[in-house]
Image: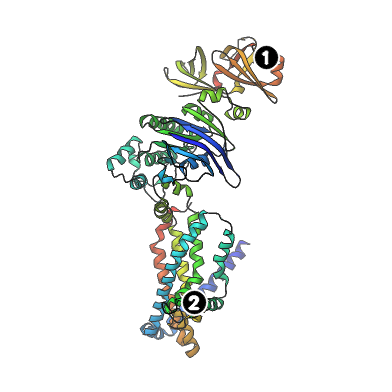
Amino acid sequence: MIFIFSLILLVLFLFIFLTLSNMIFGQILDDFQGLIEATKNKSVIGSILLSLYAGFLATLLAFLLGVPTGYILARFDFPGKRLVESIIDVPVVVPHTVTGIAILTVFGSRGLIGGPLNGYIQFRDAIPGIVIAMLFVSLPYLANSAREGFKSVDPRLENAARSLGAPLWKAFLFVTLPLSARHLLIGAIMTWARAISEFGAVVLIAYYPMIGPTLIYDRFLSYGLSASRPIAVLLILVTLSIFIVIRVLSAGWSIYDRD
Amino acid sequence: MIEIESLSRKWKNFSLDNLSLKVESGEYFVILGPTGAGKTLFLELIAGFHSPDSGRVLIDGNEVTHLPPEKHDLVFVYQDYSLFPHMSVKKNIEFGMWMKKIKSEEKLLEVAKDLGITHLLDRHPLKLSGGEKQRVALARALVTNPRILLLDEPLSALDPRTQESARELLLALHKNKKLTVLHITHDQTEARIMADRIAIVMDGKLMQVGVPEEIFEKPVDSRVASFVGFENVLKGKVISADRGLLKIETGNMVIEASGDIEVGNQVYAFLRPENIALSKTSTQSSIRNSLQGIVTDIWILGALVRVKIDCGVILNALITRQSAEEMGILLGVPVYAQFKASSVHVLR
């Protein structure tokens, strides 16, 4: 049985690895020139940078919202907690285009939130719209891993800190937060990755300015595979290398919560 | 001084019920109770980690019932010592100093020296032994100059050899720093030899408060009695030691015990009631101790009978009901209490 399961594992691995590497190496070997040209194209570079930037802003907001949420869910029991936890997970299962329609309804210029804010901040076809769409789909990753991170810190450590004279916020900042750093970092990476990969929700509220996935789709519809593939390869190479750098830099962080 | 007035708190499936207690300044006070009696929760309520539903906590006359833990002016040391794993030993000790704005490298080094952990300052808590962790936790607590120390099962995570030195360390710190200590344990022996006074807590209720002799000699009811085990504890002095056989003077009696302690030491001799045999005559046998006394109390506990005998010192024996009846054990009857030297457990 172990043998068959191992074979299946190999199939799964090859499925992911071949799909991506075939595209990347296909592009490099068949049409390296196309890749070079893509890196020189301002709109391509602009869209990739916008993806990274908007994804970063969404992650930042997710951090500010997800950390306190995760702490409350990890430390306290209250009526309806299960319901709250389920609702936080909903964005993961909602189809992306449905999310886009919902976001557009609320944040559009006549929407519940977009309406009153109209004139101060524009969501439709603007960076705030992209960030909001990315935030909606990626927030659960940060909130959940923050919750797991805080749960892994023994409340007695907080109590010990407080009995040594630390108010709750100092105990949180100097004991709980550093001890959950690895969970928070992994949550942030997942959130960022999820945000950058979002297309369906973003394209409905903001086709322009174009993020990477929107540009790839736009080029694919207008010019076909050969025009869109170099951008796809470039986007994945940039994001993968950033993830690898973050993982390497944070490799030493895991030593405290390995219990 | 800690004053606890009618403290109550309900949790989902446990409650602490109307606890009142007064711990005097400079007292070594032990809360003794079986596992699951709510001792830790009680201590956490005093420290302010939970809020009580009713009742008050006063520390040195100031009410702190609903103040946050950092305003309680005491330090809590958990059973597992709760050292911060992401900080070195030195940083752990500095944490409390930093919070209380004490800036003194000398103070830190002095406390580290007192507790013999100077060589550990740069180490990480995860790599320390149980005894070392405890000393670091005590250093971290003491460096903030507390007057009150709350200790949650401070000895139970240590091996027996370390326990003995830890006991001595705690008593020495208590004495030298004039600390008020509130120490919780499930271990009767530990309570007996460390406490100035003991409170028995069972099922979230305070059963009895008193000096150790009172608790162990006059348990208020059969539940307390069966928990404290009416172990016989005799305080005495070693007057001779010969090839592993000690002679211990206690009261006006001399008992023999096996052990390896030098002459002149003050010791506690522990003797389990089931190891005492009763006899009507003092027979010659390999049993080293045979003390004459008078039956002063009889408790029937199902198939067993607990007999209290006054032999100059008070001894509790546990015998079967059958032998009690056959021997005619009644109040006021003279008997010999006999026990082997090897069944006496001697601790310094």
Query: Is residue A170 rendered to the left or right of residue B258?
Result: left
Which residue bears the numbered disc 1? B330
- Which residue lies at the image location 38% right of the left edge and 29% below the top edge? B175
Q: Please determine whether, in this image, residue A204 is positioned above or below residue B289.
A: below
- Which residue lies at the image location 38% right of the left edge and 85% below the top edge? A37
Tell me the mark number nearer the camera, choosing from 1 and 2.
2
- Give the CA separation, mark 1 to mark 2: 91 Å
Question: Which quadrant would the N terminus of chain A be assigned to in this image?
Answer: bottom right
Which residue bears the numbered disc 2? A107
Residue B136 in picture, x, y percent from top left: 39, 41
Report the coloring of the rendering: rainbow
| Residue B126 visible at all | no
- Which residue lies at the image location 46% right of the left edge and 21% below the top edge? B267
Label 2 crowding class (10 Å Cα cut-off): few <14, some 14-19, many 20+?
many
Label 1 crowding class (10 Å Cα cut-off): few <14, some 14-19, many 20+?
some
Looking at the rendered structure, the kind of residue marked 1 is: Leu
Subunit bearing disc 2 = A
Which SS class for mark 2? helix
Which quadrant would residue B302 be assigned to in this image? top right
